[in-house]
Amino acid sequence: MPDTTPRCQAGRPALAAAGGPGGVAGLPRRAGIGLKPQHVREVLSTRPDIGFFEVHAENYMVDGGPFHHFLGRVREHHALSLHGVGLSIGGIEPPDEAHLDRLAALITRYQPASFSEHLAWSSHGGTFFNDLLPVPYDRATLDRVCRHIDRVQERLGCRMLLENPATYLEFEASTMSETTFLREVLERTGCGLLLDVNNLHVSCTNHGRDALACLHDLPLTAVGEVHLAGFARDQDAAGAPLLIDSHGSPVDEAVWDLYAQVIERLGAVPTLLERDNNVPALATLLAEAGRAEQMMAARGQPVRCGAHGAGA
Amino acid sequence: MTSAAPCSDGHAADQTDFAAALLNPQSAMPPGLRTWNGSDPQARLAVYRNNVVSALVDALADTFPVVQHLVGEEFFRAMAVLFVRQAPPRSRVLAHYGQDLPGFIAQFGPAQGLPYLADVARLEAARVMAYHAADAAPVPDEVVRLALSSGERMGELQLVLHPSVATLASPFAVVTLWAAHQAEADIAPVEIDQPECALVLRAGLDVLVLPAAAGAVAFVRAIQAAHNLGEAAALALADAREFDLTATLSQLLAHGALAALQLPGRLSS
């Protein structure tokens, strides 16, 4: 078992001050990548100098075998971000207690530096759709999502990060903007923001919004992690661009530009390079992470180290 | 929960309609959808429909590569889409999604020309189960030696199998067929109308498919049904006249398939 203290990496202050009531301490303010089964042996033999690895929690909700074996070994040398895709926080039904139990067990076992989930629903009426589905932005949904996040944070004993979604449709029932909705959820529940810059670009393109304005309208001081990923291009019925959050290609330059704005505002911030399809060689992912680290280093942020390094 | 929760905030019905539209291409557009540019929301809903179905079909393709190879990608994906729509996941953990696909294949009209296909799928499904099964250390040699020298009480021995152990008995040569599809080189022709059996288990980090005698499979199934060694051996012998207890125990021990051996009343592992 790894000990309960997240480790410092290469002399850098490893911990952000995103800690909640207990358990989850916050990720290093560096770039990280997803841990892919096809890379895990190379990761163990080369121990790349990377801020953290992220895994999908549901992939590890199995009894035993290679997934647990390798994650345990990777965890001995690297910080971990646990990212859920199955809680269905935007669902009509309350969070599944058995699923919360499984998450709690993973958090106890692997002591991740962060746990995050999505503003979306993925289960309904006992069926799991394995996708992140959209919610209307109105009072009733806001109340429900806040109740669900309250329960998650209570059960897991830690502050979670909530990810802004990539969406393709809007609802007539919506009475507020996505940014207002997110800001209210964060204020009421105390959860942090997982700012997916690709999702922001995708959703703003898909709904005719100004991404930069949306970015500045978000509570950026609550950001505990940033996601960067690639998208695919499609068209809607009117021929307008429709971007698909595919996680299957390198990060687009438009997304890097938005990320530069985030860095400008926040300085160094835990940043995941997300790739789930067409997964390239480990070196390619590390190079993308390197670009994010260079941007953070170029921005410089010595002020934050002393303020946050010792807290968690 | 098998039905939507009470409509506490007015959105339960909307989410139910949206959910139904994801898996049923014939269903009406869910109400209340909007697009910023007034374009037909149908095209945008199609993104969700496609994401849901294609990701689940991809998951099945990962679990059943030999089935896909045998029928071709186009046939496999068409069959998998029908399966996904009929039997979407009930669990938020997808690792074991598709354990019902072999039964679906057995009933699937267009696949009747390949009567062995369902058993190939059973073998592949068993491999995935074994891959994620709980860990357990093999019973130590010392315990084995002691247990096997327990004389006339030997028949009372309780065998605990490694949690990954599964069995397959087929009227077709699906073990040979599956093995042939693991090779990089050309696939040699397989005489398919030969009954074959296999044990599937994980040794360390590797899932093994071990060709096995019919008696060995009967023996393992009896052990899994909580019979002791003597009872299981008798059942295996009744099932397969050529059952060889020594060979079967050797095969199980050689691959770490036994997690414990104990005599009732005194724990020896």
Image (spheres, coloured by chain):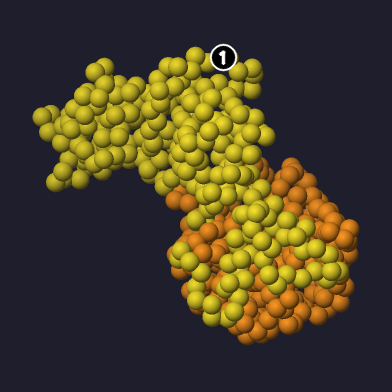
Chain colours: A orange, B yellow
A272 relative to A147 in the view: left or right: right
Residue at left 71%, top 48%? A277
What residue type is disc 1 on?
A: Pro
Mark 1, Cα crowd under 10 Å, few <14 / some 14-19 / many 20+, is: few
Q: Residue furthest left?
A: B152
The residue identified by callout 1 is B189
Q: Classify B151 as above or below B43.
A: above
Q: Toward which corner of the image does residue B63 lie, by quadrant?
A: top right
Image x and y of residue B183, in percent: 60, 22
Does residue B69 appear to the left or right of B104 in the view shown? right
The structure residue drawn at horizontal position 54% and vertical position 80%, both measured from the top left corner, is: B8
In the foreground, A185 or B77: B77
Residue in front for this viewpoint, A202 or A17: A202
Residue A203 visible in rendering: yes
Report whether B248 appears left or right of A153. left
What residue sits 72% from the left and 60% below the top? B45
Residue A272 in the image, given as x and y percentages of width and height: 72, 60
Query: Looking at the image, which is closer to me, B121 or B14?
Result: B14
